[in-house]
Image: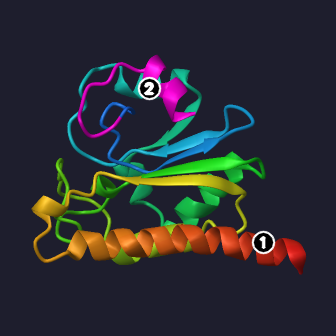
């Protein structure tokens, strides 16, 4: 699915094929039920929001997202993606550089590491079939704070799959 998007959207940043998304993107593989938690930072083009919407992504801006707890945001994502097979692309730039400094495109105003855990744990029950975790840059992470968070994000992702299997077999 990422390959199709890479061909659909002109790459504008080293950060992502999603026009420097700085966010997690949830792709429901069975239709246009995808969500994009749009973080913060500059837009590259006036059409950035519209381009995502044309691709079928629901957008939740940083300002909108901050009106809710991460559990509520997760519930909104779960409602949108339904029970179809889903791919989660997690950009570490979603996290504030105070918690994840080791990235090539840091942007202040991001979520905390605790909020990331709450968001991911709130997605329990989703049918995830694939994940990726991008933008971790070890050369900018001398204290390995970002690497530790990235490892935890990967652990949480795998835990979602294990929890789903456990629920399915119970």
Q: Give the range drawn in magenta.
A: 1-16
Residue depicted at x 60% and y 52%: 130
Residue depicted at x 38% and y 49%: 23
For residue 58, what is the image quadrant? top right
For residue 28, what is the image quadrant? top right
Q: Residues within 10 Å of mark 2 (few under 14, many from 20)?
A: some
Secondary structure type for disc 1:
helix
Residue 35 vertical placement versus 110 (above, below): above
Depth check: give the residue in front, 119 or 10.
10
Left or right: residue 79 versus residue 68 is: right
Q: Residues within 10 Å of mark 1 (few under 14, many from 20)?
A: few
Left or right: residue 72 versus residue 147 is: right
Depth check: give the residue in front, 59 or 129.
129
> According to the image, what is the colour scheme of the structure?
rainbow
Q: Where is residue 31 in the image (x, y as percent from the top left)?
A: 72, 32
In what quadrant of the picture does the N terminus appear?
Answer: top right
Q: Position of residue 27 (x, y in %)?
A: 60, 42
In what quadrant of the picture does the C terminus appear?
Answer: bottom right
Could you say which disc has been placed on residue 165 in the image? 1
Residue depicted at x 45% and y 74%: 117
Residue 133 visible, this orientation: yes
Secondary structure type for disc 2:
helix
Magenta segment: does it hold 151? no
Left or right: residue 22 versus residue 36 is: left
Question: How far apart are labels 2 and 1 at the CA level?
Answer: 31 Å
Q: Which comes sooner in the sequence, label 2 or label 1?
A: 2
Residue 126 vertical placement versus 46 (above, below): below
Identify the residue position indicated by label 2 in the image: 6
Residue 115 visible, this orientation: no
Magenta segment: does it hold 3? yes
Labels in figure, total: 2
């Amino acid at each position: 699915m990422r390959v199709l998007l890479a061909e659909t959207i002109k790459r504008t940043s080293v950060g992502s094929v999603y026009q420097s998304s700085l966010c997690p993107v949830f792709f429901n593989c069975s239709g246009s039920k995808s969500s994009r938690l749009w973080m913060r930072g500059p837009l590259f083009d006036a059409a950035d929001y519209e381009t995502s919407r044309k691709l079928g992504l629901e957008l939740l801006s940083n300002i909108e997202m901050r009106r809710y707890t991460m559990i509520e945001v997760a519930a909104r994502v779960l409602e949108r993606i339904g029970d179809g097979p889903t791919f989660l692309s997690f950009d570490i730039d979603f996290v504030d550089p105070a918690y994840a400094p080791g990235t090539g495109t840091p942007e202040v105003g991001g979520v905390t590491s605790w909020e990331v855990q709450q968001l991911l744990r709130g997605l329990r029950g989703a049918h995830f079939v694939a994940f990726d975790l991008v933008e971790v840059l070890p050369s900018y992470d001398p204290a390995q704070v970002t690497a530790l968070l990235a490892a935890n994000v990967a652990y949480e992702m795998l835990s979602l799959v294990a929890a789903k299997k456990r629920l399915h077999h119970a």
